Image (cartoon, helix red, strand yellow):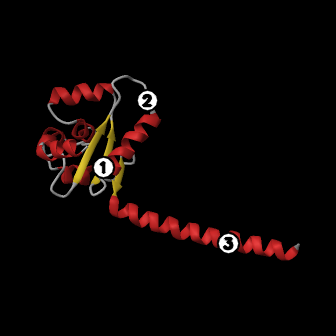
Amino acid sequence: MLEIKHKLIEKNYISKNKTILFGFAFNSNSDDIEYEDKVKMIIKNNFNDNKIAFLKGDSNSINNADNKGISLGRYEASLDFHDDKLEDMIENLSVEEILNAIKNKDKYIFWNSDIEEELKDELEDKNDVDDNNDDLEHNENDDLD
């Protein structure tokens, strides 16, 4: 995986701001959600110090991106640009600029390691409160017996 990471940096797929557009598509027209989730988890685990946007395409997207000579991630992002000039300039935009242009789109999944840590802390706090409430309920029931 380290070799892949170096190639991505070499080809400028990972920006200086540690931002990645990760285009994903199946060659066939079928979806394998379980496999897709595994791929996302591998990317998250190996690029956990990066901001990642997952942009899902389809088999046509793969061919169209290839014909335009751009990555699948850039191609998928370009589909949401309603300005023809921006769509034509997609290959010259930085990853950060592309992310800013698509960040309010619901169809993309954005992952940020800083936010993940905050969410983990909140979840742990919530679980602690739930555990304490369960203990209180258990103790109250013991008192009733």
Q: Which mark is residue 46?
A: 1
Q: CA distance from mark 3 to mark 2?
A: 41 Å
Q: Is residue 85 above or below residue 97?
A: above
Q: Mark 2 and 1 residues: CB-CB less than 8 Å, in contact?
A: no
Mark 3 or mark 2: whose residue is earlier in sequence: 2
Q: Mark 3 and 2 residues: CB-CB less than 8 Å, in contact?
A: no
Q: Is residue 34 above or below residue 127?
A: above
Q: Is residue 49 above or below residue 77?
A: below
Which residue corresponds to mark 2? 31
Q: Residue at x 24, y 43 (%)?
A: 81
Amino acid type at mark 3: Asn
Position of residue 59 in the picture relative to residue 17 (left or right):
right
Residue 142 is situated, as x and y percent measured from the top left of the image, at 82, 73
Q: Nearer the viewer, residue 72 or 41?
A: 41
Q: Residue at x 33, y 44 (%)?
A: 54
Amino acid type at mark 2: Asp
Kindly state the secondary structure of the residue where label 2 is placed. loop
Q: Callout 3 environment at 10 Å: few (<14), some (14 to 19), or many (20+)?
A: few
Q: How many dots with numbers?
A: 3
Q: Nearer the viewer, residue 119 or 132?
A: 132
Q: Mark 3 and 1 residues: CB-CB less than 8 Å, in contact?
A: no
